[in-house]
Image (spheres, grey):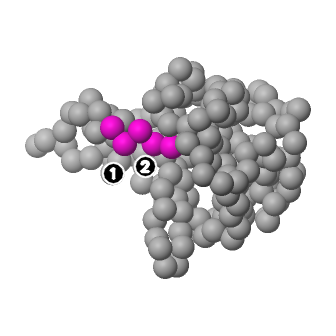
Amino acid sequence: MADDELGALAKSTNSAMIVVTAAAEGERAGCLVGFHAQSSITPPRYCVWLSKANHTYRVALRATHFGLHFLAAEDHATAEAFGSLTGDETDKFAGRSVLSGPGDAPLLTDLPNRLVARRLCALDDGGDHVCFTLEPVAASLNGPFAPLRLSQALDIEPGHGNTERPAPPTERAAGPTAG
């Protein structure tokens, strides 16, 4: 399978962008995420995939709850702040109004369309992202909104590039080899 075909198919979904926040042991973190989806209706479940290169991933491993902030089209500046800066060097929450939600999940008050969810498990299949399965515990919706889509965020340079992700992938993640 060619990577560019997979990339084109994935890009065609034009994912809605979210900001995922987490806190553990007094440390807050947050990042821009395009890999997320509802994974079960009954019981309700939601999954987010976080890059192993991100500061947020390391905090999420210790967090019990996450804040999932669904971005509206006009939230590009917030997307850029949480997507282009790294929490290793910058406090992304500085100057922002933040509430402490269930499980101390940081909730950005200027992003009212959100889900708070308890971490149930994490799946590391050896790739550069880890899937966190979450159980929603609270949600708020500030009326209908047009989501910020991947195609509207392509100008955001990631705080961590591909070269900072763990390599090589594990044998399982690399897929079958010809032989």
Kindly identify the amino acid type of the residue bearing the numbered disc 2: Gly
**Up-down relation of residue 111 to residue 137 (above or below):** above
Nearest the camera: 124 or 4? 4
For the point 77% across and 27% down, the residue is 89
Q: Could you tell me residue 111's position as x and y percent? A: 73, 45
Can residue 144 be seen in this snapshot?
Answer: yes
Picture residue at 62% right of the left edge, 40% below the top:
72
Q: Residues within 10 Å of mark 1 (few under 14, many from 20)?
A: few
**Residue 143 on the magenta span:** no
**In the picture, residue 127 is in which quadrant?**
top left
Q: CA distance from mark 1 to mark 2?
A: 7 Å
Q: Is residue 68 visible?
A: no
The N terminus sits in image quarter: top left
Secondary structure beneath dot 2 equals: loop
Q: Residue at x 13, y 41 (%)?
A: 178
Q: Which residue is mark 1?
A: 172
Provide residue 169's location: percent of width, then percent of height.
40, 41
Q: Residue at x 54, y 53 (%)?
A: 48
**What secondary structure is found at the residue carrying circle 1?**
helix
In magenta, the rendered stretch is: 12-16
Query: What label does residue 126 carry, if any?
Result: 2
Q: Nearer the viewer, residue 33 or 115?
A: 115
Left or right of 26 on screen, residue 33: left
Magenta stretch, overall SS: loop
